[in-house]
Amino acid sequence: MASSSIKQLVVVRRRSNQTQREYADHHFQVHGALAGAGKPEESPLVYYLSRAFDSAYSNASLAQPAWSGHSGATELYFRDGEHMAYGNEYTRSVIGPDGANFNDFAGAIAMFAKEALIHGSPMQQAEEQRLVALYYIQAREQVENAVLAERLEPRVISAFGSISEQIVANVALPDPDNKLRYFQGEAAPQYAIAYQLYLRGKDDIAAFRKAQRVLEDECRDSIRCETTFVLFVVRSLVFDQEAGIAFSAARQPDVTSYV
C-alpha cells in the first residue's frame, strides 16, 4: 500500500455461542462477501482477514485478561481519513449490523495505524495463506508511538530478522474523534505498535517465542512486558480494489496445517 494510506487494524474475539470454524466461516464468507459487494466509494481500498490458531498473552497475574482469547484480525486500508467508509448508508445498514453476528466486541482491540516495511522485500499483490506472528506492544513510558517504533526497529530486526521474510510495523495513530469506540470494548488497552512478522514456516513459531523473550528482556525499559501479546495467524486477502481483485471465498485462511 502507498505510504499515505491509513490502516484500521482490529483483533477480534468470536462470539461465545460459535465454534472457531463457525466464526471463521461467517467472518470471511459472509462478512467478507458483504464488504466486497459495496460500491467502491463505500468500501476500503484493500481488505485482509487473518485467522488465529494460537496465541500467548503476557500477564502479571494468573487470571486471563478480560480482552484475551482473540480469534483473528481484520485489516482495512483507506486512502486517508476522509475516505474511511463509516458514514455511508451501506456500512451503517449492512456491514455494521453484521458485526454482531460473529464479533464479541468486549474483547476487540482496534487501532488506526501507518504501516512500514522494516525488513524484507515488498509483499506481492493478492497475498494468500501467509503465516504471520501479530505482536502487540505498549510503551513503558510516555513517548510518541513513532519515537518508540524508531527506537525499537533495529532491535526488532535483530531479534526476528532471521526467521521473518518480512517485518511490518503498524504504528498507532491518534484517534481524536474517538471513532475506535465503535469497534472495541471499554476495557481494551491502547497499544503503540503492532508488528506483523511473516514467518517462514511452522518451526519458526518456537523460534519467535524464544526471540520474543530475549527482546522483551533487553527492552524492558521501553516496553510494558506485562501487557504484550502475540497471535499466530494465517492471513489472506478478502479483496483489493486497486489491483482489481474481487472477493473469493476460496481465499479464506486455512489453519489446518498448523493445528
Image (spheres, grey):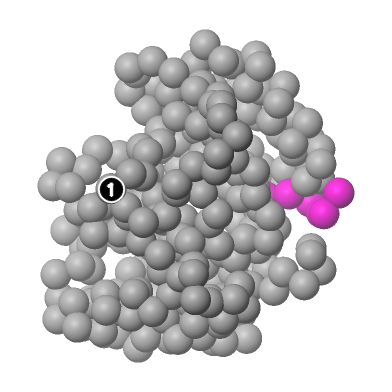
Tally the numbered discs: 1
Give percent across and percent down for residue 103.
Answer: 41, 69
Task: Tell me: 159 left or right of 51.
Answer: right
Task: Tell me: 177 left or right of 188.
Answer: left
Look at the picture and state if 37 lies above or below 203. Answer: below
Residue 214 appears in which quarter of the rendering? top right
Residue at label 1? Answer: 186
Give percent across and percent down for residue 187.
Answer: 33, 44
Look at the picture and state if 212 lies above or below 95. Answer: above
* Residue that sits furthest to the front in the current view: 62
Magenta run includes residue 119: no
Instruction: Say which quadrant the N terminus sits in.
Output: bottom left
What's the magenta region? 197-203
Residue at 26% x, 52% y: name it: 180
Amino acid at circle 1: Glu
Residue at 68% x, 55% y: name it: 54
Magenta run includes residue 200: yes
Residue at 22% x, 43% y: name it: 175
The answer to whether residue 168 of the structure is visible from this angle is: no
The answer to whether residue 100 of the structure is visible from this angle is: yes
| SS category of the residue bearing label 1 | loop
* Residue that sits furthest to the right in the current view: 203
Camera-side residue of 134 and 171? 134
Camera-side residue of 142 and 185? 185
Residue 140 appears in which quarter of the rendering? top left
Camera-side residue of 145 and 138? 138
Q: Residues within 10 Å of mark 1 (few under 14, many from 20)?
A: some
